[in-house]
Structures are given as C-alpha cells and as structure tokens.
Image (cartoon, rainbow, N blue to C red):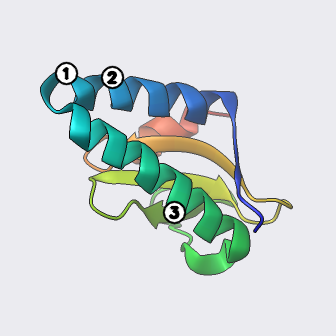
Amino acid sequence: MTSAILSPAARRDIIEIGRWISNDNPAAARAFQKSIINAAEIIGERPNIGRQRPEITSKEVHFFILRGFPYTIVYKADRQPPYIIRVLHSARDLPDILRDND
C-alpha cells in the first residue's frame, strides 16, 4: 500500500496537534495519530479522494477532512506519492495560512 508523504510543515503540525490533544486526553492523541496514518494511506491509494477548494486557494491542492477530528489535510494530489503539505484545524483561516505557505 502506497502512503502519502508528509512535508516538514505537516510533520510539525501533527506533532503540535498531538501535544495539544495529549494535554487533555492522551488516548485521543493516540487516536489522532492513528487517524493521520489511515488518512495518509487512503490519500496515497486514492489521491483524488479529497476535493479542490477554489474559494480557499487557487493552488493545485486537495482538501481531506480527517475523520473524527476537526482537522483538514491539505495535499498535492498530482505528485506520486501524494504530498501532504499541512494539517490544519478546520476553524483556522485556511486562505491566509495557505497564502503564507508559498
């Protein structure tokens, strides 16, 4: 099974999110990690599963909502394997954050 790969920024996001969740609920932090691994495998096998969001960014990226958590995985589907560029809380200002990621 091919899995999507993580950018350095996505790795930092996952570490920070895991630490934040772990402060209140270590079991939920472990579930978050498992959900990220599962999502990377799904994206790796089916890169077009996420959808593009032109109202958020004109960049050629797809968005995949992380099951069970309020986080969005932003990735490049046109790479092989797909490349996860960020993992962001869905309530954050995604257009602003992604504009700063040029």
Q: Quadrant of residue 41?
A: bottom right
For label 1, the residue is 23
Between discs 1 and 3, the one toward the N terminus: 1
Q: Which residue is mark 3?
A: 63
User: Image quarter for residue 33?
Assistant: top left
Q: Position of residue 62 (x, y in %)?
A: 59, 64
Residue 99 percent coordinates (x, y)? 55, 38
Mark positioned earlier in the residue sequence (3 or 2): 2
* Other residues around mark 1 within 10 Å, as few (<14) / some (14–19) / many (≥20): few
Of 25 and 88, nearer the camera is 25
The three-letter amino acid code for the residue at tag 3 is Phe
Q: CA distance from mark 1 to mark 3?
A: 27 Å
Residue ranking furthest to the right? 80
Answer left or right for 39 relative to 70: right
Q: Residue at x 53, y 67 (%)?
A: 54
Question: What residue did someone put label 2 on?
Answer: 19
